[in-house]
Amino acid sequence: MLMRTDPFRELDRLTQQVMGTNGTLARPSVMPMDAWRDGEHFVVEFDLPGVNLDSIDLDVERNVVTVKAERPPRDADTEMIAAERARGVFSRQLILGDNLDTDNIAASYSAGVLSLRIPVAEQAKPRKIVISDQGEGRQAINA
């Protein structure tokens, strides 16, 4: 269902996170996720606390889902005592298998969690195949 991404793409993404987009050092941003199968759906949840719904961008191209989000920076006048939560723009890509129906992804956002429900494609669902026995009788076999 979920396939690993190209290691060189991951290295490039990590380099951009560490070095920042303008060459200045930046802390890596994370978007933790959970993924599981729930009956006829594949469910993915991303933790995005402190992110406004308007700043979340969800794209699907072929079987690649890209989630981009932005947690705005604090005011420059704010004197930080501790700053452990990543700020700025961050993204994550998932490469989905062909057995998922990416045309019918449903997304919702509640309490800082972005949830995706991706249906299992019809051709990947189990089905019965009828076998005839030289015209004498028929039996059903679960595929």
Image (spheres, rainbow, N blue to C red):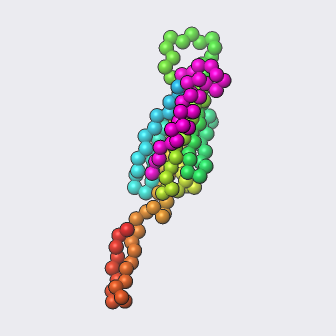
Q: In the rendered view, tell whether residue 95 sits above or below residue 125.
A: above
- Out of 61 and 88, give the one closest to the viewer: 61
Horizontally, residue 118 falls left or right of residue 37, namely right
Q: Residue at x 53, y 27 (%)?
A: 29
Horizontally, residue 126 falls left or right of residue 65, namely left
- Out of 95 and 82, give the one closest to the viewer: 95
Horizontally, residue 36 falls left or right of residue 75, namely left
Q: Residue at x 49, y 14 (%)?
A: 82
* Image quarter of residue 126: bottom left
Q: Residue furthest right?
A: 22
The spot of residue 49 in percent (x, y) is: 50, 30
Specify start and end residues of the magenta stretch as a single range.
1-27
Q: In the rendered view, tell whether residue 47 sits above or below residue 42.
A: above
Residue 122 highlighted magenta (yes or no) = no
Residue 72 is at least partly visible in this image:
no
Quadrant of image for the C terminus:
bottom left
The spot of residue 131 in percent (x, y) is: 37, 79
